[in-house]
Image (spheres, coloured by chain):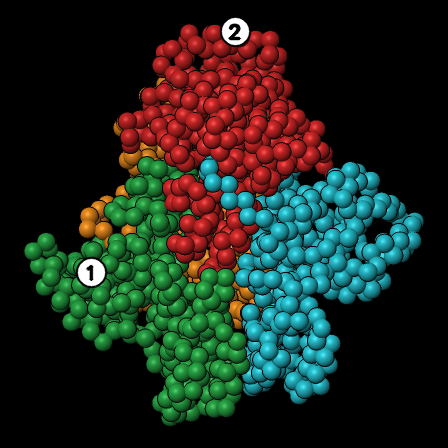
Chain colours: A cyan, B red, C orange, D green
Amino acid sequence: MSDTETTTSSNALSHAVSNASFPLDAIDTATLLIKCRDQAGIVQAVSEFIHRYGGNIISLDQYSTAHEGGQYFMRLEFALVGLSEIVDNFEASFAHTVAKRHNMNWRLHDNAIKTKVGILVSKFDHALLDLLWRHQRGLLDCQITSIVSNHPDLRQAVENFGIPFHHVPVTKDNKVEAEEQIHTLMAGNDLLVLARYMQILSSDFIERWPMQVINIHHSFLPAFVGADPYRQAYEKGVKLIGATAHYVTAELDQGPIIEQDVHRVTHRQSVIELRAIGRDIERNVLARAVNWHVQNRVIVTGNKTVVFN
Amino acid sequence: MSDTETTTSSNALSHAVSNASFPLDAIDTATLLIKCRDQAGIVQAVSEFIHRYGGNIISLDQYSTAHEGGQYFMRLEFALVGLSEIVDNFEASFAHTVAKRHNMNWRLHDNAIKTKVGILVSKFDHALLDLLWRHQRGLLDCQITSIVSNHPDLRQAVENFGIPFHHVPVTKDNKVEAEEQIHTLMAGNDLLVLARYMQILSSDFIERWPMQVINIHHSFLPAFVGADPYRQAYEKGVKLIGATAHYVTAELDQGPIIEQDVHRVTHRQSVIELRAIGRDIERNVLARAVNWHVQNRVIVTGNKTVVFN
Amino acid sequence: MSDTETTTSSNALSHAVSNASFPLDAIDTATLLIKCRDQAGIVQAVSEFIHRYGGNIISLDQYSTAHEGGQYFMRLEFALVGLSEIVDNFEASFAHTVAKRHNMNWRLHDNAIKTKVGILVSKFDHALLDLLWRHQRGLLDCQITSIVSNHPDLRQAVENFGIPFHHVPVTKDNKVEAEEQIHTLMAGNDLLVLARYMQILSSDFIERWPMQVINIHHSFLPAFVGADPYRQAYEKGVKLIGATAHYVTAELDQGPIIEQDVHRVTHRQSVIELRAIGRDIERNVLARAVNWHVQNRVIVTGNKTVVFN
Amino acid sequence: MSDTETTTSSNALSHAVSNASFPLDAIDTATLLIKCRDQAGIVQAVSEFIHRYGGNIISLDQYSTAHEGGQYFMRLEFALVGLSEIVDNFEASFAHTVAKRHNMNWRLHDNAIKTKVGILVSKFDHALLDLLWRHQRGLLDCQITSIVSNHPDLRQAVENFGIPFHHVPVTKDNKVEAEEQIHTLMAGNDLLVLARYMQILSSDFIERWPMQVINIHHSFLPAFVGADPYRQAYEKGVKLIGATAHYVTAELDQGPIIEQDVHRVTHRQSVIELRAIGRDIERNVLARAVNWHVQNRVIVTGNKTVVFN
């Protein structure tokens, strides 16, 4: 309790759950992601380029796997007054100079442009509601455009947030059409989030959203792949249960892991109780993973992720 | 993802967040809490008494502080067909025999009767919404009767859950009247929960709700008592921040601690980010504390708690 | 820092790592473990029996899987003056009355008699030294009789603790003889601990020590069974690494799990660093598991454990 | 268990407990620490300077408190063939160019030169032994020169590691002389570690070792300053206990915090058990703090630390 009601507007909190410091003002800041062969002079070249444009580096993270073939990864945030006007020029110039010279795989993201996110869900609402709450409080740095579910149950809960809800029933027979319908409804999004969507997406669908679909799996992968992992955990008698947020690939529950967490349990918990405890893990792990993705903190390399947070 | 939609009705999950196994059927089960001087034969006497009534012990927890004056605490859940009919007889008989013989301070709770809970809140909605959501899912083993706030902001969010919302403004001048109004509105509840209620309740008010008010303080008590603890934590440079659920007593933030938890932070987080991270700790810690209270798992002794979970 | 050197003798700490309260005096206390079909009146019958002998129940834990066939488990510690004189009489009487009536699978352990423990190790010393150090400090409630290693490296470190060290080299050709030699050296022990013993014991050997061999596996099982789990974890890109203490059965790394724990890692850690971080997890997890076993807190049921701690 | 004995020489593990990637070869790498006013072009200027010398940046961490007066902090590791020959020239040149231009507070550390560490201890051996074990395994990136204790008890344990042990008794009357003797014995060290040294060092002594003394305090500071914090924690009834590693300043237990951690406890643990659980926290927290310090990962700012790990 406290008599001083320091109610800071949570709209400033965009990056708050990201465990990373954030730009004072999203306008006029950009994020640069780089992937290339490890070599001398990269930091110098990049920072010198930004400096020449009058930019100021806000944060810089780098990682190199020198001991295994020497891949190099960089995430750099910088502030630059009037960025939006000169961003095209900046990109063109960067492409023909620094990026070319060092043979970089790179991407520039204007922080003023919010990532568009669509969410798929079935009947369990905990992961979905947690994302919607955080978004409403300004704690998820993206734009949630619409929700699709194979069940009608969550329409009211979703519409309370003023977000469109689409019911797309899925049966053995209409699976292809249903996925086509989902693909159309979700067109224009940068990211799809499976917030406990209990249908397996076809590899055709996945291929159209490469590293653009994040799933929350309700186990500590690679343990307990597939159906009803809490029952598997119960039957194995593990002393910790967990959840894993990962990019969806053609192989079930095998995509690059973004985030994981666990919670201690004992022999006393029934499968039903494990599911309930797991819900709290799932919603937090998924929220962290989505926030890191939309903040361009995640770089995929092989079947693993580099997360700059 | 999983094609098998094992959607277990979450309405069975009453005790799920309690980290403790639970009665198969709340009807016909009761919880007995005992506090007395440590002495031989207590378990024997109590279990023999219940056995005589045809009851079956579902769970039994005990704790004794033998090394300090020897206080003894017991929590016992038992099943007894037709309990409601014979509960008065049971209590009367227990009082005159076992309880009297061992000079026990005891309480019997029929698990079919749900604890009535009222919630006070200000502007921050995270702790409140989490309680309402868990309640709606059958994850909070109580009846939430109504919400009182000193701000109008959360009316819609609360009413979406079908629970009455009362706006009771508090100013320096009307504090006494406001508290009187709150007391009247909350009459009939067994427990009041301060879900980030940013007004200090008077000791007069507290005395009328002894060990019946649970507050969530946004620090790892006893560190950072009082206002804006996240700023205090930031300025101290601690490497973990926390939250504490405790019973409210006349002395600010000094009542018996029910539950605490922490989250790792670094020098990088601003005060605003600490507040955002803290929200996730607060809502979980408060939900656990409230659930343990309404399941009669908490016994207060001196300024500490015995929590059988 | 503190000028008051409150150096409490750590020799009183026998149960300290067990997260459970402990008998004031190990002499004259006993631990009773019971396993039977769930049924009414067990607590009453057992407590009444102990009461008749003038015993006082110090702690009582029970667990029943009512929802799955109804198995019942109890761990009960009681104090009884002059126990050692009457223990045989107590056991005989208990067997013919309570145990017989409820068809119990049971065991009585006089807490004055320390469990005899032998340790097998290879070259890594972290798990071994931690056990020896805890034992020396009175933090491991057992008697460590001797150490066997397939390498000579750790002789001096072991002998510094005044414990005999035996070097038993193991090759492809002498495996049978080596195991025979180990079995002979370890005869008389109640428990064998594999503190990073890097040889797979034959099923013949295991069968002679049923549920009497505890191994520390350096992964969060069931993930990463077999060789070099830290490399497997590195290649999978998990965000948490762990360790698992389990009873050894014929099937590699599949025995009943006693305890597990994890530690957060990032993409930055190399395999070598994962191994180093893992050491801290391994030594703590193994120490907890061994302590729970020697305190008779672990009951095996099927391929799972009930741990009363 | 595993038949493949992948016993990687732990001597490569120097930085292993640091949760940070480490130089492939400590020879020919250096660490540069910078503190200055936040301003544009710092990264560019520094990286360009290193590049001109043919150095390659291995890791770069930076942090700026833009929102509070704009302080800037950088830690940079670089590899440079033949560093030792040109290091003086490098420093002189850096001082007169980059450092001068940006008015930097800076320090260059040749990673080939190990930090010299002396340890003070009383009777509790857990924190001391853990440091000595890690050091022996190559997990502490420093040179431990000698141990001083105000009690003779730990001589044998220390000398088993081949490290000199000095007994310096401290009484009310000889405190000044004792500290003088300690200061002389410890002369030449870069860091003093108080591994549960139960004497309060005078401010005169502390002033001679500014931010060069690390203490492990056995509570989650700022809670429970001073004597017997585990008893304070017990009496407060907290649900988590902790330990804090901090630099020692004139004010008792108030210096800049380097690292903290906690462990969950319940009402069941006695003070003696809290002390035992606490030992495991203390030794890990202290080891991390010392490792970060000797790896030049800690920068003090005001009464807080920036830890690049």
Please identify the quarter of the rendering in which residue B54 is found. Answer: top right
- What is the C-alpha distance between the residues marked 2 and 1? 70 Å
Q: Where is residue A192 in the image (x, y as percent from the top left)?
A: 76, 57
Q: Where is residue A18 in the image (x, y as percent from the top left)?
A: 58, 58
Q: Name the residue that disc number 2 marks.
A: B89
Q: Image point 39% across, 28% down: which residue?
A: B250
Most foreground residue, C169 or B190:
B190
- Can residue D300 be seen from the camera position used here? yes
Secondary structure under the numbered disc 2 in the rendered image: helix
Q: Position of residue A172 (x, y in %)?
A: 89, 48
Instruction: Name the mark nearer the viewer: 2 or 1.
Output: 1
Circle 1 chain: D
Identify the disc placed on residue D203.
1
Disc 1 residue type (three-letter): Ser
| Mark 2 neighbour class, 10 Å CA radius: few under 14, some 14 to 19, many 20 or more | few
- Can residue A232 be seen from the camera position used here? no
Most foreground residue, D135 or D100:
D100
Disc 2 residue type (three-letter): Asn
Q: Image point 20% across, 56% down: which residue?
A: D200
Most foreground residue, A11 or C294:
A11
Please identify the quarter of the rendering in which residue D293 is found. Answer: bottom left
Q: Is residue B72 left or right of residue C69?
A: left
Q: Image point 61% across, 19% down: which residue?
A: B112
Q: In this view, does B150 lie to the left or right of D221?
A: right
Q: Position of residue A42 (x, y in %)?
A: 58, 83
Secondary structure under the numbered disc 1 in the rendered image: helix
